[in-house]
Amino acid sequence: MSKLRIHDLKNHIGEKVELEGWVYNKRSSGKVRFIILRDGTGYLQCVGFIKDVPSEVFELMEKVTLESSVKVEGIVRADERAPMGIELSLINLTLYHLAEEYPITKKEHGTGFLMENRHLWLRSSRQVAILRIRSEIEQSFRDYFYNNGFVLVDSPILTPAACEGTTTLFETNYFDEKAYLSQSGQLYLEPACMALGKVYCFGPTFRAEKSKTRRHLMEFWMLEPEVAFATLDDVMELAEDFLVYVVSRVLDRSKEDLKRIERDTSFLEKISKPFPRVEYKDAIEKLKKLGSDIKYGDDFGGDDETLLTEKEEKPLMVHRYPASVKAFYMEPDPQNSDLALCVDVLAPEGYGEIIGGSERISDYDLLLKRIEEHNLPVSAFQWYLDIRKYGTVKHGGFGIGLERTVAWICKLPHLREAIPYPRMLYRLYP
Ligand code: 4AD
Ligand code: MG
């Protein structure tokens, strides 16, 4: 049988139990001493009265330092005042390792210091809650696609060509060839959806973004579905249905953690279908009215996305951007070939783009033309062009950035807290 953990205790009231963990906090008031134990599933107040515990245990409760690893034994008591409605009447305390003075304390630390100590910062209650929510979001990502008939197709990390523009490629050596770290698994999913109908991939992706913003990481996780016979409308519907599922799942299963980080969940409770949809050209007009100096034809900057979404209650789906600001593989709008059949989903509360997707070019000659226009090496894309030679069909999909989703759902000010070990401009340690 597996060992008990703090979140299991509600089913063990009145029983004698043993638990392992770390000393999160402690206090003392003469005849009684308290240790708050943490184990990654919760926080447990352990109480030792001088008259009830052996004297060496009472002394150890005083001597033990924050973050020391310990085993506690005691009786589980229901107590309404305790954070989880439970506390432990201590019988025994075993010290595994006495921690040195812990560098991260309750006082405010600078961001540089926290990032330098990310491996320790992870233990803070806020970071623990965020990591737990991230894990729930990731699981909900996978479950949605699994439950809806998608097949997981893992895409490679080492690739011979660019997917999302050549300016953000991380280059590496592949024996005598050049290789690039994957910017997106999409190009590999398109052939796979011709084999399996509905597919998705989920993995780390890499972009050498030479910009220092709260929205950009060099390494981030992206889930990408790709669907054969799908149009832009199908892609938008899928994105909408998927996001509603993810948010409701997190609201349902991560209540405690959302509370710990003081997320006002009333915003998340409003996420339901349908999401507002707006064409790029109308979004430009709206931005101008809101005071932006953006012009038709420009891509949105981070500030524009914030301006567009800070008053929104639901994700905003902006579709049909000019093809000139988007990737080479997007199908042109038959009504106006200067526009791409694409959508960006912008998260509300000012968060901005979390999803980018489109219908893909299905015609061989047009795709070849686009590859040439973008000065991409045709030979490296021959396999990708091949798909358009054998039973080509309309198809489309999107990519959702995990960290941007976590940042929005947790209302984080910066992506660096949304991933365990962020890779940012000038940060590769730890
Ligand atoms: O809009 P992007 O570049 O789209 C693609 O990569 C497509 N190939 C996806 C597809 O259609 N299969 O990226 C998709 C999402 C963005 O909306 C954003 O959430 C996230 O990936 N993203 C980043 N997240 C963190 N840091 C970065 N530097 C990011 N770049 C993109
Ligand atoms: Mg994008």
Image (spheres, helix red, strand yellow):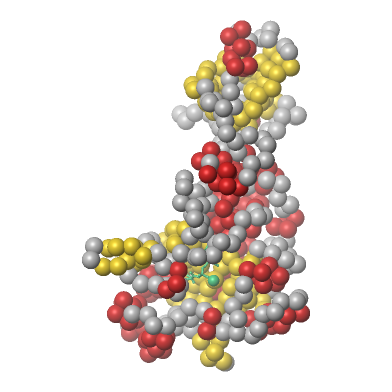
Provide residue 408's location: percent of width, then percent of height.
64, 58
Residue at 49% x, 72% y is 397
Residue 145: x and y, percent? Answer: 50, 61
Residue 298: quarter of image: bottom right
> Does residue 174 lie above or below 256 as drawn?
below
* Residue 272 visible somewhere in the drawing: no
Extreme residue in the left direction: 176
* Above/below status of 318 relative to 68: below
Identified at 68% across, 67% down, the residue is: 306
Badge count: 0
Left or right of 22 in this view: 227: left
- Seen at 53% across and 51% down, the residue is 419
In this view, the residue in front, 322 or 234, is 322
Q: Quadrant of residue 270?
A: bottom right
Q: On the picture, is 100 further left or further right than 87? A: left
Q: Position of residue 83 (x, y in %)?
A: 70, 33
Q: Nearer the viewer, residue 356 or 115?
A: 115
As drawn, 215 above or below 62: below
Residue 331: image x %, image y %? 49, 84
Is residue 94 in view? Answer: yes
Along the line of sight, the residue nearer the viewer: 430 or 332:
430
The residue that appears at 58% across and 56% down in the rendered structure is 415
Q: Is residue 372 left or right of residue 221?
A: left
Q: Quadrant for residue 293, please give it.
A: bottom right
